[in-house]
Image (cartoon, helix red, strand yellow):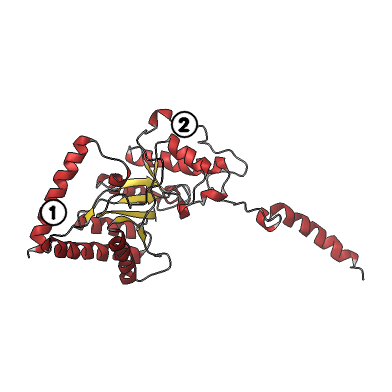
Amino acid sequence: MSFPGWIVALTTPLFVVTWVVAPRETISGTLVSRPVFPDRRPGEPPPIMQLHHPQLVYESAPTKPIYGLERVWNVAFTFDDGPHPVYTKRLLEILQRHQIRATFFINGYWLDARHRRGAPALRKLVQQAHNAGHTIGNHTYSHARLSLLPPDEQRWQIMTNHRLIMELTGVRPTLFRPPYATMTDAAREVIQDLGYAEALWSATALDQEVHDPEQISHTVLSWLRTYKGGIVMLHDRFRWSVEATDLILQALERENCRRLRHRRPMFRVVSLDSFLRPPPQSWALQIANGQQRREEQLRQLCSR
């Protein structure tokens, strides 16, 4: 049985085009990503590839990922994938009410004025978070899965966001969280050159899928009780996650009141930096004094 000539004439160009433009994993079985970089034309080399600051190497940065299990009864709150114009702002208000300093692992794509109409307002929100004492961490430019990118694209993702954070805060970021918790040797080399510490987490909930603040709060608190503290990871792009954060902080305060009455160790909400490296002596003294004031406030709160 033979195919009519007109079918062959039509399908042959279609097959050729498909072969050229289709993702490689559909042709050869090799997993190759096709990330979208809105500010680069196809084939254009990353403009920041040559950006290198050997003088910024931070020798005390941990060489292994930090999960938050290193110091019992300490809790650090971290939020990924922001900022969001509504929910990040609401979260900052909640953190201010509870006198908590958190870490925001941001994606620079949201702050790019060339592609996001709301970018100027979001930039101000990041600066507001920084000025309020929160830490701004690097979460890559577009939340790319680094293990699927070639080395030059991995470097571009990290260093573009690195430069953006420095521009907004005036401070060199030192905390890096890889999207999907996946790293490569190439990415690890970049963050080591820049003096980053790789910060992961030990307490979280599937807040991308679970939309119930009560359930998210219950899950996170279970992790914290099991491991006697840890690093909390949620997302400030979701309303339910922001509401869950308020519930978690209220629950920790109530639990600390019970622990105070029974003279048991209490949870201490600390900055993520305290998990990563010992602070300078002057900082350690300030932290200790601040913690004493916080515990005194807790005693007054619990006595009501």
Q: Is residue 138 left or right of residue 46?
A: left
Please name whichever residue, 211 or 36, is drawn nearer the observer in this view of the structure. 211
* Residue 52, numbered circle: 2
41 to 301, vertically: above or below: above
x%, y% of residue 105?
A: 38, 50
* Residue 295, numbered circle: 1
Tag 1: amino acid = Glu
Residue at 35% x, 71% y: name it: 212
Quadrant holding the C terminus = bottom left
Residue at 26% x, 45% y: name it: 131
x%, y% of residue 172?
A: 35, 37
Tag 2: amino acid = His
Please name whichever residue, 179 or 39, is drawn nearer the observer in this view of the structure. 179
Q: Is residue 97 left or right of residue 103?
A: left
Is residue 193 at all visible to an observer of this figure? yes
Is residue 235 at all visible to an observer of this figure? no
Answer with mark 2 or mark 1, whichever residue precedes in sequence. Answer: 2
Q: Quadrant of residue 206?
A: bottom left
x%, y% of residue 147?
A: 54, 49
In what element is the residue under mark 2?
A: loop
Please name whichever residue, 184 or 37, is drawn nearer the observer in this view of the structure. 184
224 to 53, vertically: above or below: below
Considering every residue shown, the one lying at the far right of the view is 1
**Mark 1, residues whose alpha carbon is within 10 Å: few (<14), some, or many (≥20)?**
some
